Amino acid sequence: MGKYLVAMFAGGLAGMAGCAAAGARELPGDAALGHALALRVCVGCHEIGPGEREGVLPDPPGFQILADDPAMTPLALRVFLTTPHANMPNLILTPAETDDVIAWIYSLKGK
């Protein structure tokens, strides 16, 4: 268990450094894969895109709301996606899946 946590922490730090270094460059990850993953995993509660929502919970923010929030930088999204939340299922995304979801959310900016 300890080795797993150390590996996750090291992977998260490497991903955060890559994300912070990306700046204005293209983000790592594939927005189309992030969209597909969100449709499989997140759509039960969150609106992924216009009309893409199965859940009836009123509180979870839609992905467009996250994209429009200036505080949601790639680093902030990475921290959010890799930190457990009381009102969310304990989803464990791989570093590549995290990159993909971040790329999807960032593709919504300005829409």
Image (spheres, rainbow, N blue to C red):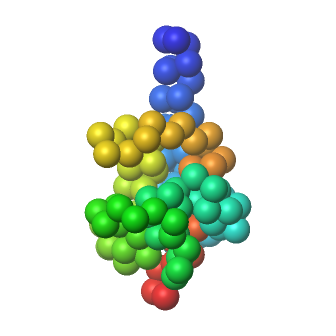
Residue 15 in view (yes/no):
yes
The image position of residue 56, as x and y in percent, is 40, 65
Q: How many marks?
A: 0
Residue 12 drawn above or below residue 111: above
Residue at the outermost bottom position: 111
Identify which residue, 10 or 77, lies in the foreground: 77
Residue 2 drawn above or below residue 34: above
The image position of residue 41, as x and y in percent, is 58, 52
Identify which residue, 55 or 77, lies in the foreground: 55
- Residue 46, by quadrant, is bottom left
Residue 14 drawn above or below residue 4: below
The image position of residue 20, as x and y in percent, is 47, 55
Q: Residue at x 53, y 29 (%)?
A: 8
Identify which residue, 23 or 73, lies in the foreground: 73
- Residue 92, by quadrant, is top right
Q: Residue at x 56, y 18 (%)?
A: 4
